[in-house]
Structures are given as structure tokens and as C-alpha cells.
Image: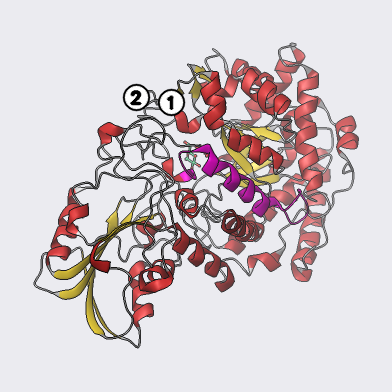
Amino acid sequence: MTPPSAPPGRRIRGRLAIGTSLLALTIALLTAGPQAPSAHAAGACTSTADCLSKMTLAEKAGQMTQAANVYISNKQDVATYGLGSVLSGGGGGPSGAGGTASQWADMVDSYQSYALQSRLGIPILYGVDAVHGNNNVQGAVLFPHNIGMGASRDAALVQSEEDVTRQEVLGTGIRWAFAPCVCVPRDDRWGRTYEGFGEDPSIVSPLAAAAVQGFQGSALGPTSVMATAKHYLGDGGTTFGTGSSGYLIDQGDTRLSEADLRAIHLPPYQSAVSAGVGSVMVSYSSWNGQKMHGDQYLITNVLKGELGFKGIVVSDWAGIKQLPDSTYAGQVAHAVNAGIDMIMVPDNYVETINDIVADVNSGLIPQSRVDDAVTRILNAKFALGLFGHPYTDRTYTAQVGSGAHRAVARKAVSESLVLLKNSNSALPLSKTGSYSIVVGGKSADDLGNQSGGWSITWQGSSGTNTTGTTFWQALQQATAGTGITLTNVGTRTKGRYSADVGIWVGGETPYAEGKGDSSTLAFGSDNSSQLSDICSHVKTCIAILYSGRPVVISDQLPKAQAFVAGWLPGTEGEGITDVLFGSGFTGKLPVSWPNAVTDEPINSGDGKTPLFPLGYGLAPY
Ligand code: BGC
Ligand code: BGC
């Protein structure tokens, strides 16, 4: 296949223009005001209609194509092919995983400088998974994953979270977030359960709208980050055992009647669309055996027609490659005709562009479908003010990870905690008097375990992977200057020690999509023995569980006087100590908690008896 032909003279003109662009970029960086001067390429088009009228078919196909930074070996391709978008997947930083906000901004601005050298100077929209803060970036604030935000039931808090995340994303020059996940997880064995706000659409819908408003404001504008409601439709409803890509349940088949699909999984999209969400990402999953990526009825008729969605429908990472068509060109046509506007390729972007062009030329894809897709993409770019101000506003960069931002996350952590048990008034803890606390468990002093998946890397990792405060560090701060003495036994819990109070912190270790699917929801034998050991050495024992979903704790509950579902709190451990020392529990379970894995799937209203029902949460003080 031949690449779309470049207009004659592009190369030389491009080189000169890059020089100009770098100069303008330098000026932009030096002045660094909220709206730094732009490097607007000569010849740029000035409105959606103007651009459309000037674009070749290949340029339109380029706009519909999103490549991952890790697959772009030559940034000049962004200019040559007029790519519409570049993304960073989980862990896709400026040079491998991590990288500071200013290194990210340099990377994004560099891609942008190439986009501005394309024939029409159309800026790229850079996209990233900012699913609990701008979570790929070293030093960014990490909020509780959505399941914890769901426990708060606090829409204003979710809006504040995403307003902070908006600023931390703007600080990296990025204008598009692949968040919020508005999934309705119905089976806790799904490894993405924690990305959802809860098992019932009545919990998810208001928080979905609040998240969109936090990212975008009341409408897309020059200080917005475009939000993405994902993954459309039914990602949280897949049947255990039907997963694709070798997974147990992730990317599986949602076997539901249309009435149930609409009743359970559609409401959050209605809510997000009403709030003006700029994009919707299609789900890897299938509905009754049909891949969502090819579902014209649900994407075009329902989402764009019935719901009136005017924004960009983006496919998921290589999602179109799972369509049953025998050739890639066939998969491209199938997806575009179903209503996908932008293809998250992420690797073979030249082939994708060529295939869109070939499919239009052969009549497989109507020209009108391409024009509609490009109109949606350009409308978003104009609304975001990218043409006038394509580069990072560095005033935001300096604020990434600021104290003010961390304070919002700390409050979010406090509101996310759910108290499952509190015998003998074990909680709250007092700051007066003299007593001893022993702390242990594998996650008490582990920021990575506290943050979960989608933290610096795609799957997350144990250990110190970014800047933040672990539970143990927060406890030291909270008790400084009091009569409380602290000991941390870590995972060495079998030793000779004793204390008045024991606090165990453990649970699941980080995972993300696919790898997080579980057939057991097991608490884990290491957790079990560490919890037993600590509790056997103290008078009052408190268990704090970090997990992305309910795990089986029926046998563990009797060991401790107090039991807290802490979810995946993120970087601000003080939010936990604030509550333990008396600010009070307000969180309510966003999911039904099973007695045993054999209860799964278990959801409110299905007639099963959970260990703790949806909405459960003690508030003794
Ligand atoms: C996930 C999406 C994510 C995308 C880009 C996919 O594997 O399903 O949620 O936005 O990758 O990282
Ligand atoms: C990327 C993720 C993406 C996943 C899809 C990973 O390599 O980092 O962002 O979601 O692949 O399989």
C-alpha cells in the first residue's frame, strides 16, 4: 500500500516552517501567560467548514486517525499524514513510563509543532487516560479510583476531582481525557470494577454528569479538557467466562435483552450527553455476540440519533481489529460505517489512513460519513480553542501536584471510606491520652498498593511509584506531638510485640483491565495470616482493606473489631487518618458485597442475600 501522497514541496516548506514554529514555541514558553501566543501555520484553515472545503480525502482520513506516541517512530509523520490525534496509553510517557509534567508538556508541544506544519496546520488533539487524576505523570495527584468516589455519592466532590484533574491534564498540554468510565459493573470478578462508580445506574448517572462538568465546564472551551464517557455500551455487563483476548470476563459478551441493556447500562450515557460530553469511547465487549465496535444500531441510531450525541465517537485501543471482517480494510469500513469517527489505531496508522481512502474510493464508506466524522473532530478542536492556542499553558504545569490539589483528593479519600464493622466503639481513635498502636500489613506503607492500576504504569505496581503520603506516613503526621507511640511491623507480623491498638492495612495488589479478572475474589493467604497475627497481639484491632472491588472477607471479619473498605485511595493517605481520628464515616457501599465468590454476579434487586447490601455503611460518630 502506498502512503497518501504529500503535496509537492511539502518537505522543504515543512522544514522552514518547523524553524518558525520552534521560534514561536520559544516565545510562547517565555511569555507563558494563560493564553500564550500561538504558532499558527500559514495556510491554516479557519473554521470547520473552511477546513472541510480545503481538505483532500487523505487529509480527512488523517483527522480520523489516532496513533499512540509509542508507535510513532518519526514525529514528522504527524505533519506528513495530518494525523488528527496522538495518544498516550497507560504508561506511555515521554520516555517510557512516568515523566514529570513539564517533560510531558514538552513531548505534547513537540507533537503539536509537527501538526501545525501539516498542509492546513490543523492542530492535534492529544489524548490520555486520566482516570483518577492525570495518573501517568510523576508527581500528579492520584484520587481514589471511581468505586471509592461512588461510595461518596457526592457529585460536587466528583466535579471538584475532575476540575483538579482538568488542571493537571492542561499542565501537560493535553486536551482530551479518556474518562470518566461510566460503566455499571455487575460482576465483581471483572478487573475493571474499580473504574466504575457502582453497580446501579442511579449511582453512576449523576456522578457521570458531574465528572463531565469538572473536565469541560458548562461547555467545551479554551480551558476545558474534553471528557470521554466510556465504554459504550455494556462493558460492565459481560458474562463471566466470555472474555476475549484470553481474559475471563473483560471484553466479554453482555447477554441482555435490549430492555435490560437500556435500563442498566444506557442511563449514564444519557446523563453524560446531557452534560455535553465531547466524546464517547466504544467498548471492546459484545452485545449478544455482536462486537460493539461494529454495532451501527447502538452507535449511530441510539447514541447519535436517539440521544442526540454530537461529539466524537472514538474506538478503543486496537478495538476495530477484533471485528470479524476478513481484512483490515473491511474492519475499518465496518467500524466507520457503524459510526466510529476516530480510530484509536494505535500502531498501523498509515495503513488505516490508506484504507479509509480506499474504502471511500471503492464505495464501501460513503463520503458523507467521512465528512460527518471530520466535522465532529474539527468542531471539537475549534471549540477547545486549539487553533488559536495549540501549546501548553505552563501556568498549569507548575500547579501539578500542588498542595491545593492534594487537599481535594484528601477530602475525597475521607468521603470514600466505608465502615463495615465497628464493635466496642473501636473507632474513632483518640488523640488524647497515652497508648500504643502497632501497624502492619503489606499495604500500610506502600503507595503503589494504595493507588492500584492506572498509576504511572498501565497495570500499576507495588512500591513507591510516585509522590504521595502512605497510610503509615499519614499516621506518623497525625500522631506527632501526642502521647501515642507507633510501631510498624510491616509484613513481619509474627514477632514478639504488643500494643493497645493494631491497624492492619492490606488487600489486593495493583492490576488493571484483563489481568485483574478474578475467578476467586480471594482475600489472600498472606493478608489472612498478617491480619490474624496483628490482631492477636493487640486489644483492639482495625482492618483497612485496599481493594478495587469486594473480596471475600466473611472469614476475616471476626478477627478485627473494626473493618474499613478503603477501596484504592490514591496518593493522599491523610484522608484515612482524618476519619480514623474522628472526622466520621460517610461512605456507603456502591456495590453489593458477596458472602462468597459463588454469589457472583450479585446486585441489588436480584433476590440474593449479600454479606453487606448496596448502600451499607456505618456512621457511628
Ligand atoms: C482501555 C481504554 C483506554 C485505552 C487507552 C484500552 O485498553 O480499554 O479504557 O482508554 O486502552 O489506553
Ligand atoms: C497500553 C494501554 C492499553 C493496552 C491495551 C497497553 O500496552 O499501555 O493503554 O490500554 O495496551 O491492550
Q: Is residue 338 above or below residue 382?
A: above
Residue 15 in the image: x percent, y percent?
78, 48
Spatial separation of the CA atoms under disc 1 and disc 2: 8 Å
- Image disc number at residue 241: 2
Which residue is nearer to you in this view: 1 or 338? 338
195 to the left or right of 333? left
- Asked if ligand 1 lies within 8 A of label 2, the reply is no
Q: Is residue 122 above or below residue 153?
A: above
Quadrant of the frame with the C terminus: bottom left
| Magenta residues (range) | 195-224
Residue 120 in the image: x percent, y percent?
84, 40
Q: Amino acid at mark 2?
A: Gly
361 to the left or right of 111? right
Picture quadrant where residue 249 is located: top left
- Image disc number at residue 38: none
Crowdedness of circle 1 by 10 Å Cα count: few (<14), some, many (20+)?
A: many
At x 65%, y 45%, the residue is: 227
Write down the residue under mark 1: 252
Which residue is nearer to you in this view: 384 or 24? 384
Q: Amino acid at mark 1?
A: Gly
> Is mark 1 in CB contact (under 8 Å) with mark 2?
yes
